[in-house]
Amino acid sequence: MTKKSSAWEKLGGPVLVCDFDGVIHDYSNGFQGVDVYGDIIEGAREALEELSEKWYIIIFTTRATSPELMAWLLSHDVKCNTINTLDHNPPNTSVKPIATVYLDDRSWPFVAGDKPQFDKEVWEQVVKDLNNFYIKLEKIQNAY
């Protein structure tokens, strides 16, 4: 069983930090402008709505919390508790929000099999996976 973090205790549930670009809206064309967004990714609205029943959801993005971003989220009925906030972090911590889980299109899962924590075997698997991924990235880049 996972020990409840101080954030979980403070916010009343496990904390899901969810990226915006490439996770909630289509970012396949890359950055197109400060307040230019793609279409909502199919299934994102429904998934976040279901998760919001048990999870405290923070949308954490490198984009500023602009009126246009807020309007886009509202127009697509995206459920979350907060956007770009660290109110639940203890004093004197960094700008990385405390979370139970991070959901990001550019993250790499730091697990090996069913292991709940990292060790030498996990690091070896990460190196293997990232080296294979690098080969695929090179092929994509060289195709242009």
Image (spheres, rainbow, N blue to C red):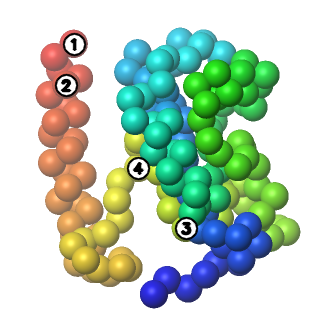
Can residue 71 be seen by looking at this rendering? yes
Going from the N terminus, do you reach mark 4 or mark 1 first?
4
Tell me the quadrant of the picture where the N terminus can be found.
bottom left
Which residue is under mark 2? 140
Instruction: Check disc 2 and report its element: helix, strand or loop.
Output: helix
Q: What residue appears at the point 65 percent right and 64 percent down from the top-left corner?
A: 98
Alpha carbon distance from label 3 to label 4: 15 Å
| Residue 42 position (above or below residue 57) | above
The answer to whether any part of residue 93 appears in the image is no
Mark in front: 3 vs 4: 3
Residue 119 position within the rendered picture, expressed as x and y whole percent measured from the top left: 32, 81
Q: Is residue 90 above or below residue 46?
A: below
Q: Secondary structure at mark 4?
A: loop
Given the image, on which type of amino acid does mark 2 rest?
Ile
Q: Which mark is residue 100?
A: 3
Which residue is label 4 attached to? Answer: 107
How many marks are shown on the rendered structure?
Answer: 4
Q: Which mark is residue 14?
A: none
Structural crowding at the residue carrying mark 2, measured as other residues with C-alpha within 10 Å and reported as few (<14), some (14–19) or many (≥20): few
Q: Residue at x 66, y 16 (%)?
A: 35
Contact flag, marks 4 and 2 (Cβ < 8 Å): no
Q: Position of residue 79 (x, y in %)?
A: 62, 41
- The span from disc 4 to disc 2 (Cα, nearest Å) is 19 Å
Give neighbour class at mark 4: few <14, some 14-19, many 20+ (Cα, 10 Å). Answer: few
Q: Which mark is residue 144?
A: 1
Mark 3 or mark 1, earlier in chain: 3
Distance of mark 3 from mark 1, alpha carbons?
38 Å
